[in-house]
Amino acid sequence: MKTFAGFGTLSALAALTPSLAFAHSGGAHIHGFFAGLGHPLLGMDHLLAMIAVGIIGARAGGRSIVLVPLAFVSAMVAGAFLGMAGIGLPSLETTIALSLVVFGAMVGLARPLPMAAAAALTALFGLFHGNAHGLEIPGNASGIAYAAGFMLGTSMLHAIGVLSVLKLARWPMTVRTAGLATSLVGMAMAAQAF
């Protein structure tokens, strides 16, 4: 119960801190590889979503450990290319918030989704996460370095999600509770977006 209270507190703080909630503040922060590498850590939406994708893949087991995060990253790159071409997807911030609700629910399920369903859902939302950043990336070498750093940072957070499932295998309710907290944060962010 203590873990649930802690996650609830974290969720409430994230919901009340809009400047930390969404990491998409425009192009001023883009300065190359290290800015891209650190960017997924700066927005609660990215941090929680990327770790959740790793957890989803690890819970599905087998090849999903690699394929689910790979589906997300691949779709994220495609979404970034759309954004760099000036094509913005509709309801971007709301859909990113919704991704936390869905990813959190997927983590919280008693039984993990099959690999195909997990990969499809993570890829769908990866497209939106990538598009948000593609709209911000300038079309120069600094923007390319930023994108490379962002992909590496994203992949590292996926790995943290995978490792957390492996390390907490004896305490599955802890992982499932983290999923519930992620969904609550997503709901709060979606409410702010409206």
Image (cartoon, rainbow, N blue to C red):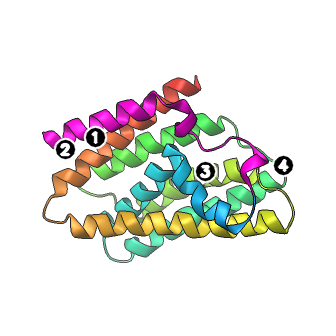
Which residue does the numbered mark 1 point to in the structure image?
7
Q: Nearer the viewer, mark 2 or mark 4?
A: 2
- Which of the labelled discs sits on residue 3, or is there none? 2
Tell me the crowding category of disc 2: few under 14, some 14 to 19, or many 20 or more residues within 10 angstroms, Cα based: few
Which residue does the numbered mark 3 point to in the structure image?
129
* Dot placed on the residue nearer the N-terminal end, 2 or 3: 2
| Secondary structure category for the residue under label 3 | helix
Q: Which residues are magenta?
A: 1-30
Disc 1 from disc 2: Cα separation: 6 Å
* Dot placed on the residue nearer the N-terminal end, 2 or 4: 2
Image side of residue 13 versus residue 94, left or right: left
Image side of residue 194 versus residue 164, left or right: right
Of 144 and 118, which appears nearest the observer? 144
| Secondary structure category for the residue under label 4 | loop
Q: Amino acid at mark 2?
A: Thr
The quadrant the C terminus occupies is top right
